[in-house]
Image (tube, grey):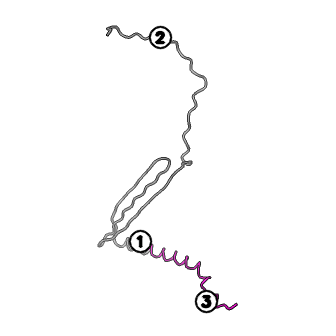
Amino acid sequence: MSKHPVKVEKRPLRRVRDNPIATIEPVAPHHSFLSFRYSYTEMSVSGRTARVTSRSARYEDGKLATEAFEGELDRSAYDRAVSEVQRHLLGQAGLFARMFLPFLSPGRLFDRD
């Protein structure tokens, strides 16, 4: 090996192009191809406390985000939530049954014409 340092030849300067290189613009976030949301909430009761567990996940704009929490509530909060859900489901079932009421009326069943 030589003990002399390497000598670099001087090169002529290059001219900069007048037209810049075309760059690719990022895709707008509201035009994403795929997005979804998922959520799960569970309430259970044991004794005087109610336990709440919730998880959610979402995929938007190429990013996956997840959240989860657990907590405890008083039994009365659980009872209120259950009664509200029952009232809501019974109301929806009543609306669904009313759609069929005109087909089940006694006047049409016994009409002889």
- Checking the image for residue 6, the label placed there is none
Q: Quadrant of residue 78?
A: bottom left
CA gap, disc 3 and disc 1: 38 Å
Name the residue located 36 percent from the left edge and 10 percent from the top edge: 5
> Residue at (58%, 22%) from the top-left corner?
17
Question: Sequence-wise, which precedes: disc 3 or disc 1?
Answer: 1
The question of residue 2 being in magenta is answered with no
Query: Residue 46 at what x, y percent from top left?
Result: 30, 71
Residue beneath disc 1: 81
The span picked out in magenta is 84-113
Which disc number belongs to residue 10? 2
Relative to the observer, which residue lies in front, 22 or 108?
Answer: 108
Residue 105 falls within the magenta-colored stretch: yes
Q: Is residue 23 above or below residue 50?
A: above
Q: Secondary structure at mark 3?
A: helix
| Left or right of residue 64: residue 16 | right
Tell me whether circle 2 and circle 1 mark residues in contact (CB < 8 Å).
Answer: no
Q: Secondary structure at mark 2?
A: loop
Residue type indicated by callout 2: Lys
- Mark in front: 2 vs 1: 2
Q: Residue 20, relative to residue 35: is it above or below?
A: above
Q: In terms of sequence position, does the residue under pointer 2 or pointer 3 come before the other?
A: 2
> Of callouts 2 and 1, which one flags the residue occurring earlier in the amino acid sequence?
2
Callout 1 amino acid: Ala
Kindly identify which residue carries mark 3: 106
Measured as percent of width and height from the top left, residue 105 is found at 61, 86
The local secondary structure at tag 1 comes to helix
Q: What type is the residue that disc 3 sits on?
A: Pro
